[in-house]
Amino acid sequence: MTHTLTFRRPVPGAERSASGWHLTWQGTAVMGILNVTPDSFSDGGRHAPLPAALAAARSMLEAGVLFLDVGGESTRPGAEPVPAAAELDRVLPLIRALADSGVVISVDTMKPEVAHEALKAGAHLINDVTGLRDPEMIRVCIQAGAPACLMHMQGEPRTMQLHPHYDDVVSEVHGWLRAQAQAALAAGVPDALLDPGIGFGKTLEHNLALLRALPDLTAGPHPVLVAASRKRLIDFIARVPDPADRDPGTLAVHLHAARHGAAVVRAHAAGAHVQALRVQSALGQAGVH
Ligand code: HH2
């Protein structure tokens, strides 16, 4: 399956047309996770000095990721917000250092001011776990010509796992994502990736229902991103308390997502994902870019 994401700014590997720059890939691409935070639930502190972050980025690039997702604020359940200035101090040096590396850089932020500065520094795509709820974030994307990944979250990270509740999780999440994407595109955002937000205000049953319903979301007009990397649902299913041990379960979820049309999977173990997706592709299923 071919996927396309449209930008109104130059992007490595994208083709230019009258309507913008179109990044096109076959099968499921990998977005490598690069958190430059002290407290992310899986890779917190690991990429703190810039050389360590660059070494991790290089190894993901060599492995064949299409996107790198740079994050400066943890959104794990219970996380406290970080001031914009601190988030910028974390992400900008890395984005600047990666700007000429030929990778598509996404910035994982909920704050319009961080998104604005990150796009100025060389990022191409906004990954907003609040799904462009803030109109200012929409303005930032339009002004910079950047598409956004819109993720669904019930509540906010500090409290989202206390009492998640839906009458019908699949229709509520899919309906909300489609409406947000439609509004964003109508306002002038160049394009949108949709993400059901695994683990964001959802019980295990909610997560499983959304993963089983992926064919409904991927049948729609927007490319879909799935991000289950090392999340707690894997512990609930397979009893793996340490996030660092959850890559096998992550791969199982992401290969399922690829078979059901996901355009992108967001992963910590990026190299393992590229390898597994290439093998799955060779077996006649969805594959890697
Ligand atoms: N999950 C996390 C962060 N960003 N972005 C999207 N689009 N979808 C997700 O599911 C998603 C996301 C949380 O994972 P991680 O970045 O590994 O941890 P932390 O938030 O603790 O930094």
Image: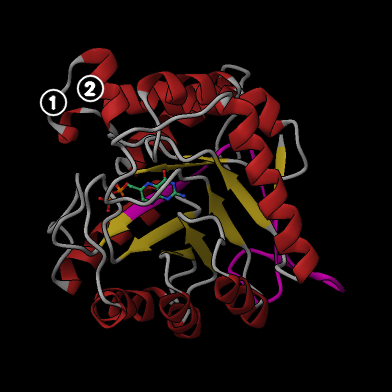
Q: Is residue 197 visible?
A: yes
Q: Position of residue 161 (x, y in %)?
A: 30, 37
Direction from residue 30 to residue 149 in the image, left or right: right
Q: Amino acid at mark 1?
A: Pro
Quarter-of-image position of residue 35:
bottom left
- Could you say which is closer to the camera, residue 144 or residue 232? 232
Residue lying farthest to the right in this orientation: 18
Say left or right for 198 vs 190.
left
Q: Residues within 10 Å of mark 1 (few under 14, many from 20)?
A: few
Q: Measure how far apart labels 1 and 2 are at the Cα level.
A: 6 Å
Residue with the mark numbered 2 = 235
Position of 287 with respect to 62 (left or right) is right
Q: Which residues are magenta?
A: 4-33
Specify few, some or many for label 2: CA neighbours under 10 Å numbering under 14, 14-19, or 20 or more: some
Determine whether 179 is above or below 216 in the image.
Answer: below
Q: Residue at x 52, y 65 (%)?
A: 126
Q: Position of residue 148 (x, y in %)?
A: 59, 61
What's the residue at 34%, 28% (across, down)?
250
Q: Residue under circle 1?
A: 241
| Image quadrant in which the N terminus is located | top right
Mark 1–mark 2 contact, CB under 8 Å? yes
Q: Quadrant of residue 36?
A: bottom left
Type of amino acid at the residue the image marks with label 2: Asp
- Mark 1 element type: loop
